[in-house]
Image (tube, rainbow, N blue to C red):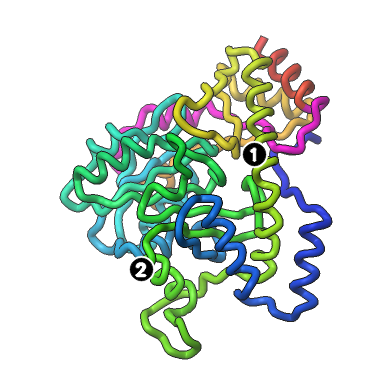
Amino acid sequence: MIDLSHPIIGDDERAAVDAVLSSGNLATGARVAAFENAFAGLCGVEHAVALGSGTAALHLGLMACGVGAGDEVIVPSFTFAATANAVKMCGANPVFIDIDPATFCITAGDVEAAVSDRTKGVMPVHLYGHPAPMSAIVEIADSHGIDVYEDAAQAHGGSWMGRNVGSWGRFGAFSFYPTKNMTTGEGGMVTTDDADLADRVRLLRNQGMQRQYEHEIVGLNGRMTEIEGALGLVQIGHLPEWTDARISNAAHYREHLDPELGIPPAPQHGTHVYHQFTIRPPDRDSLTAAMDDADIGYGIYYPVPTHRQPPYIDSSADLPVTEKAASQVVSIPVRPDLTSKELELIVNVLNEAVA
């Protein structure tokens, strides 16, 4: 079986975890702090706050920005539901907009059309690792006096116009789930240049405490463990080489796959880190059947857009590009440890299927 994705765990990760277990210090501590510093450096920001999941990063980031009841946050529907769920959990309302058919990301034009007098901010998603058009989105947001929050859960190390994702908005939110480009098992990160916002996220993740048993605000338990921090420190060291391998695999597909498979275009103004390589074949069912027969893993992200999910089914959003993408897309293996033989097999199976 050629897996679509799996965590890459080596001796360095095992040794790092064993060192934490031997120390007896399992809760948030020095390793988490070191991982935060390293990740802030990756994103080119002043502050990074480690959390228990990517969803916690979205949720606590929004809370720290004051998003609440009566507010609206503009979001894509074509993404994992955590994007809209985090807005809802703050008591605010997600306003769904459509996507660019080539990049699967939202556009500045659609953002502007959705702004109302209740709009608090917009949350672009760097879907599949492709950066959203941040310069234009930030320009529109600034013209309307609204915030930008980045859902960068799939885009570790990505960039737009030479500037790292996670550094454009009031905050960026990353996930370290096992399928992501780097993992801590679970875990997330808020990145920001706003010191006050970072401090508020730290309070929110720790029951509102800066000092033990002194609760300054109402908070939650959103902390990252030392085990996760230790894993993150090792994984972030591998991320550049893994990203290069993903980009190389994507280039191989563009060169060798039949264009009839609906190959995504190469990014024009940013670095796509290929969390997924997502194609749009003319007949998804026949293609996935051929991949099943060849024991090649694949994923469909996402078959039901968020605005069609039960918690949001009353949405009046008219999103034809999103609906079409949901009916067509399929993601194929692009993970960094694919062998040349596996790449060749994937190309042959897909080309034969579409022919």
**Could one spot residue 85 in this view of the protein?**
yes
Q: Quadrant of the N terminus?
A: top right
Question: Can residue 307 be seen in this snapshot?
Answer: no
Q: How far is disc 1 from disc 2 in space, using C-alphas?
A: 32 Å
The answer to which of marks 1 and 2 sits earlier in the sequence is 2
Rendered image quadrant of residue 353: top right
Quadrant holding the C terminus? top right
Which of 323 and 339 lies nearest the eye of the viewer?
Answer: 339
**What residue is shown with label 2?**
196
Q: Residue at x 46, y 49 (%)?
A: 166
Mark 1 nearby-residue class (10 Å; few <14, some 14–19, many ≥20): many
Choose between 107 and 241: the one closer to the eye.
241
Residue at 78%, 34% (x, y): give it. Answer: 2
Residue at point 20% right, 50% down?
145
* Residue at far left of view: 117
Q: Amino acid at mark 1?
A: Thr
Q: Amino acid at mark 2?
A: Asp
The percent coordinates of residue 57 (x first, y second) are 48, 60
What residue does disc 1 label?
A: 243
Asked if residue 138 is among those painted magenta in the image, a careful observer would answer no
Q: Position of residue 335 (x, y in %)?
A: 70, 37
Using the image, determine if residue 173 lies above or below residue 140: below
Residue 30: where, in percent of width, then height?
63, 73
Based on the picture, tell me whether residue 315 belongs to the magenta stretch. Answer: yes
Q: Residue at x 68, y 28 (%)?
A: 249
Disc 2 crowd, CA 10 A, few/some/many (<14, 14-19, 20+): few
Please identify the residue farthest to the bottom as the structure is shown.
Answer: 213
Is 100 left, or right, of 30 in this rendering? left
